[in-house]
Image (cartoon, helix red, strand yellow):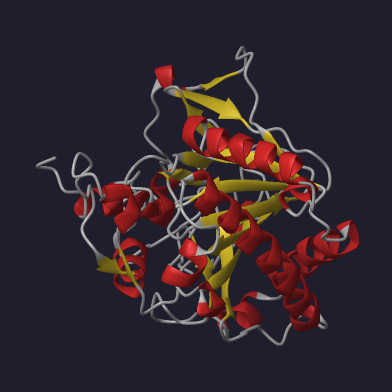
Amino acid sequence: MAATAPFVSQPPQASITHPPPKLTSIKALAELPGLSSIPSIYTFPTDPNDQASSDTKESIPTIDFSLLTSSIPDERSKIIQELGKACQDWGFFMVINHGVPESIMKAIIEKCRGFFELTEEEKQEFEGKHVLDPIRCGTSFNVSVEKVLFWRDFLKLFLHPEFHSPNKPPAFSEIALEYSKRVRQVAREIVRGISESLGLDENYIDKALNLENGLQVLTANFYPPCPQPELAMGLPPHSDHGLLTLLIQNEIGGLQVQHKEKWINVNRIPNSFLANIGDHIEIVSNGKYKSVLHRAVVNNKDTRISIVMPHGPALDTVVSPASKLLEDGSNPPAYKAMKYKEYLELQQSSKLDGKSCLERIRNHAI
């Protein structure tokens, strides 16, 4: 769900009678008249055994956020248990009754759509050059290291502890600021619940990782129709950096989650967030809760837009397994300590490849 690439130009393979314009985004490529096949650089290696399973009788757990903030101890205790089970069994869960108005959720999707509909020249004002630039837009994930490009454009913004936003389209920054404040409140409360479910103090993660100054990122993903969706990929299998990601999308599906070695299609629940725990919850929990692989597939009819908001520690925070979870000596640290900023730079500068970044700091001797 993270992104690093600048916009790039790729030769089209459409039936065009005049020289094509310079292509700077997947949106521009997808809108070429007569496009019936995709350039080979977008052809993703496929495995026939890797298709999504539709026959699973299991569904992603649902967490009622209102019970997390309940003043009735039994209600809160029960939902903490359910939250812990969701983290351990799935790593993904739906969040309902979260209190964020549906009107704001719809508005941020439409404002992000408006950004992607700007001219290519206008969007290039916000390209960014470094993986930690607070405003960046581009295509694929990291074209400087990728051999295959992904059918995706993105806008990535750092919204907290300092708020950054493009000045186009009109009112984008006002909507993004309001949305970010409300979503951050939800995320911090869920992280408190996760902390408690691990047997830690409810504020342990919040304080130890300095979430008051924690990084909040907004990544808007734009997946236009693809003439050969079976050959392309929106985003490949990956886990997220940070502690907790909250996702919303328009009415078009495309997200798949790996569960028990099968890919499961995620069906949208109106006015809900899809939450997933990130690599840094796996580190803090010393592997009890694991970040989960997920991917984005594309279709040949409709544009999918998703708004993904990872919430992480403060950038200068060193993250390691919680000491309380290591106390009895039978559970040695499974991950090396690493500053969050360094982890973020490592992940964003590399190919998006499963959980390869987390594997680099795993203590393999254990």
Q: Is residue 19 visible?
A: no
In-front residue for pair 306/121: 306
In-front residue for pair 325/259: 325
Q: Can you name the residue that lies furthest to the left here?
A: 365
Residue 292, image x, y percentages:
45, 40
Q: Is residue 214 left or right of residue 273?
A: left
Answer above or below: position of 151 versus 124: above
Q: Is residue 76 visible?
A: yes
Quadrant of the rendered structure where residue 299 is?
A: top right
* Image quarter (top left, top right, bottom left or bottom right) of the C terminus: top left
In this figure, what is the number of numbered marks? 0
Residue 182, image x, y percentages:
75, 68
Residue 201, image x, y percentages:
50, 57
Q: Is residue 139 left or right of residue 357?
A: right
Residue drawn at x 24%, y 63% is: 337
Answer above or below: position of 27 versus 43: below
Residue 304, image x, y percentages:
70, 48
Residue drawn at x 56%, y 80% is: 124
In-front residue for pair 117/264: 264
Answer above or below: position of 349 versus 92: below
Residue drawn at x 60%, y 15% is: 56
Q: Is residue 1 left or right of residue 94?
A: left
